[in-house]
Image: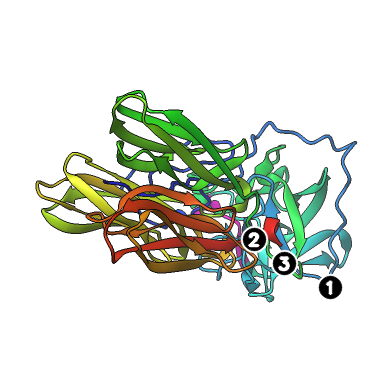
């Protein structure tokens, strides 16, 4: 009985240089979908340029303490991205926040005007952030680190914008420091000086470098729905609540149903596909998490042709990412699946046999490893006792919750009919067998959630 588990995830905060086979990417304010085989779309916590703040009602932020170093984040890019000084050989830019000296900024008041500041990074304390060349001849006009000279182009004023600041250039009157959009076409995506506006790209937050990084998973939730199969070929899906994305999925199906896909459907749904006589029961379960707690969240796929005999197909996350879950789809008339599980900390594979071949696809749901604390793969191996319906479960360690799961089963001896989360912290397979010594494994991908602390 062909069957596979899988999960599908989707969202992005990916770096533009990363390559892979992206299926879906979700951005907070952009409905962009990428399906280029070697592209990764960017995930911006996008804020529309016309989104304004009522400065009269909002609390003004404190002015910088000269004894502290700060991370600089824009309202547009959100809590994940910080201003990086670079090494002076290219413009400054926004990138994933980390414990890096190039993201630790100090504000030094100008001696003859304490309301103006020069900005140094701890990586280059002897250089100052320059507003950039208005002609675009130096680093295409990007802001950059230059030898401190006292020039007005290296001086900035802090203009409160509600709970944010605008950094206005003294040397380039009417211009403000612009964090750009992720992968934006202007000045190669670097930060630059742009006409001052109410854009979230120009609203900056100063975050004390001594505070912990903003990483932490949240919003773990399991949702399910059950239906009667209408007959012939059909699909059934269940959706995550608003503000959450699917990070894994599975379900159950009647033994008379030929399952041909267990996969994500869009950003928030987990879906089964399969063929069955009218009236067969099936249920779909989605594991969900908060979208804004998953940096670099994206789905990668690998589609190929199954050759005769036993084969694997694998989808891989880009460097620096870990696999949250995965799954696949396959030609149910010619391919019999017996594996759907993580093959490493950064890949997911499905395996099966075929006499005639056919097309199939593996999916890997990925996120930046720095944003998935306590990422761990737990495997339980065992023997189906051959006494009817049985379960095997992989359980996460204390303090961790299950993102997703899968496993292996002897398809010739075990009729699998479940691949589901057990509570919040485990994953199980279930199936029927009358044979002894039928091997199977359950696998859970686990991580620490703020919800579980």
How far apart are the alpha carbons under marks 3 and 1?
Answer: 18 Å
Q: Residues within 10 Å of mark 1 (few under 14, many from 20)?
A: few
Tell me if label 3 and label 1 are in contact, CB under 8 Å. no
Residue closest to the eye, 444 or 160: 444
Q: Report the side of 208 relative to 50 (left or right).
A: right
Residue 209 falls in which quadrant of the image?
A: bottom right
Name the residue tied to disc 3. 212
Q: Position of residue 57 (x, y in %)?
A: 90, 36
161 versus 274 height, above or below: below
SS of the residue under disc 3: loop
> Going by the image, does 452 lie left or right of 373?
right
Q: Is residue 20 left or right of residue 379?
A: left
The residue pinned by badge 2 equals 215
* Residue plotted at (65% across, 35% down): 49
Where 95 sits versus 225, above or below? below
Q: Is residue 38 visible?
A: no
Q: Is residue 443 visible?
A: yes
**Residue 84's x, y, as percent?**
61, 63
Q: Which residues are magenta?
A: 136-145
Q: Which mark is residue 281?
A: none
Identify residue for label 1.
67
Whether residue 139 is in magenta: the answer is: yes
């Amino acid at each position: 009985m062909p069957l596979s588990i899988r999960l599908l995830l989707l969202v992005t905060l990916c770096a533009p240089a990363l390559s892979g086979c992206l299926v879906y990417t979700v951005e907070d304010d952009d409905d962009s979908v990428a399906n280029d085989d070697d592209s990764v779309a960017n995930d911006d916590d996008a804020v529309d340029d016309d989104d304004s703040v009522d400065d009269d009602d909002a609390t003004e932020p404190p002015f910088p303490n000269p004894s502290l170093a700060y991370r600089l984040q824009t309202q547009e890019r959100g809590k994940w991205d910080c201003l990086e000084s670079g090494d002076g050989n290219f413009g400054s830019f926004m990138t994933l926040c980390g414990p890096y000296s190039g993201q630790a900024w100090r504000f030094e008041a100008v001696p003859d005007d304490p309301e103006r500041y020069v900005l140094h990074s701890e990586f280059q304390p002897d250089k100052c952030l320059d507003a950039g060349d208005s002609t675009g001849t130096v680093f295409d006009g990007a802001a950059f680190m230059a030898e401190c000279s006292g020039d007005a182009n290296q001086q900035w004023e802090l203009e409160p914008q509600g709970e944010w600041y605008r950094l206005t250039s003294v040397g380039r009157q009417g211009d403000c420091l612009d964090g750009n959009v992720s992968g934006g076409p202007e000045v190669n995506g670097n930060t630059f000086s742009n006409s001052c506006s109410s854009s979230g790209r120009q609203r900056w937050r100063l975050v004390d470098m001594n505070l912990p990084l903003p990483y932490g998973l949240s919003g773990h939730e399991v949702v399910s729905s059950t239906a009667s199969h209408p007959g012939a070929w059909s699909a059934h899906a269940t959706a995550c609540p608003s503000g959450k994305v699917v990070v894994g999925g599975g379900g159950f199906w009647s033994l008379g149903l030929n399952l041909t896909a267990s996969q994500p459907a869009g950003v928030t749904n987990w879906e089964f596909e399969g063929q069955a006589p009218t009236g067969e029961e099936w249920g779909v379960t989605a594991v969900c998490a908060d979208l804004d707690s998953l940096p670099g969240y994206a789905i990668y796929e690998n589609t190929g042709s199954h050759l005769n005999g036993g084969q694997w197909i694998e989808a891989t996350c880009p460097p620096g990412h870990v696999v949250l879950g995965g799954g696949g789809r396959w030609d149910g008339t010619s391919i019999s699946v017996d594996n759907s599980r993580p093959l490493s900390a950064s890949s997911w594979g499905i395996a099966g046999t075929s006499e005639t071949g056919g097309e199939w696809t593996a999916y890997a749901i990925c996120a930046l490893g720095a944003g998935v604390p306590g990422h761990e793969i737990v495997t339980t191996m065992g023997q189906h006792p051959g006494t009817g319906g049985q379960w095997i479960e992989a359980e996460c360690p204390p303090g961790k919750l299950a993102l997703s799961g899968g496993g292996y089963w002897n398809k010739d001896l075990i009729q699998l009919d479940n691949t589901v989360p057990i509570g919040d912290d485990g994953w199980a397979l279930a199936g029927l067998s009358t044979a002894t010594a039928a091997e199977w494994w359950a696998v859970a991908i686990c991580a620490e959630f703020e919800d579980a602390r």
